[in-house]
Image (tube, helix red, strand yellow):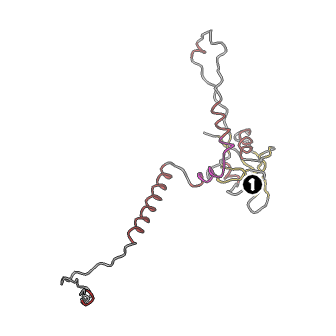
Amino acid sequence: MEQTALRPKPMPGQEPGGGSRPRAARHPHAAPRRARKLRTLLLALFVGTVLVLSGVGLGTVGATVIGMSRLAEMQRQLERTPPVSTRSNPSSPSPSAASPTPAPAPPTATLGVEAVDAAKAGALIVGVHVPGPGFAAGLVRGDVLLQVGKARVDSAADLARAVADTRPGKEITLTVRHQSGGYQQLTAVPGIVT
């Protein structure tokens, strides 16, 4: 027969061997939970730091996820087109043909807004650059642009085309449907892309 059943329990705060060192409370599942919380926190800090250091804001990430595919596709097509040669006859060297200077590109207009395709017709404004022509005209996030000048806007690509066709510094009329459902005509002066 074992004598363990008759062994007296130690007094609180004392070890069975006669020492007076208090015992630590045991929580066997606390350590893995703490480690998991620490890993999650460190991962969140790492991802946040990478986003901040790369200059990507959450609005930009959202706009990319929502869909700028058509506009990005148009920009890629423009990058792929070969440059037009300024030389008329490459066999006749002349001082001006030896070092051709490319003609400066005409200035491109901008409204200073970020837009995506709206659920219906129009371009949904998802971002307005604060010192910009769109902000000065009164555009806010959530507005839907329906018309730029005389050009109808059915998508974000249509908006980009319509704004690019305008002259910087010349007033244009924007037809806007606000988030509340009201329509308004705003006057904007497109700026120059630098």
Residue 137 in the image, given as x and y percentages of width and height: 71, 52
Q: Secondary structure at mark 1?
A: loop
- In magenta stretch: residue 80: no
Query: Is 186 on the left-hand or right-hand side of 104?
Result: right
Figure label count: 1
Residue 138 lies in quadrant: bottom right
| Placement of 93 over or under 152, stated as above or below | above
Q: Residue at x 48, y 51 (%)?
A: 50
Q: Residue lying at the far top in this picture: please name it.
A: 92
Question: Mark 1 highlights which residue?
Answer: 119
Residue 35 in the image, given as x and y percentages of width and height: 40, 65
Residue 67 in the image, given as x and y percentages of width and height: 66, 49
Work out whether residue 96 or residue 71 is closer to the camera in this orientation and state it: 71
Work out whether residue 31 or residue 184 is closer to the camera in this orientation and state it: 31
Query: Is 24 on the left-hand or right-hand side of 134?
Result: left
Q: Residue at x 65, y 12 (%)?
A: 89
| Placement of 103 over or under 47, stated as above or below | above
Quadrant in the picture for the C terminus? top right
Q: Residue at x 47, y 59 (%)?
A: 44
Query: Is 99 on the left-hand or right-hand side of 9?
Result: right
Q: Residue lying at the far left in this picture: please name it.
A: 18
| Type of the residue with mark 1 | Ala
Magenta span: helix, strand or loop, mainly? helix
Residue 100 in the image, given as x and y percentages of width and height: 60, 19
Q: Residue lying at the far front in this picture: please name it.
A: 1
* Residues in magenta, as a range: 60-72
Work out whether residue 41 or residue 172 is closer to the camera in this orientation and state it: 41
- Crowding near the residue tagged with mark 1, few <14, some 14–19, many ≥20 C-alpha atoms within 10 Å: few
Work out whether residue 114 or residue 50 is closer to the camera in this orientation and state it: 50
- In magenta stretch: residue 61: yes
Quadrant in the picture for the N terminus? bottom left
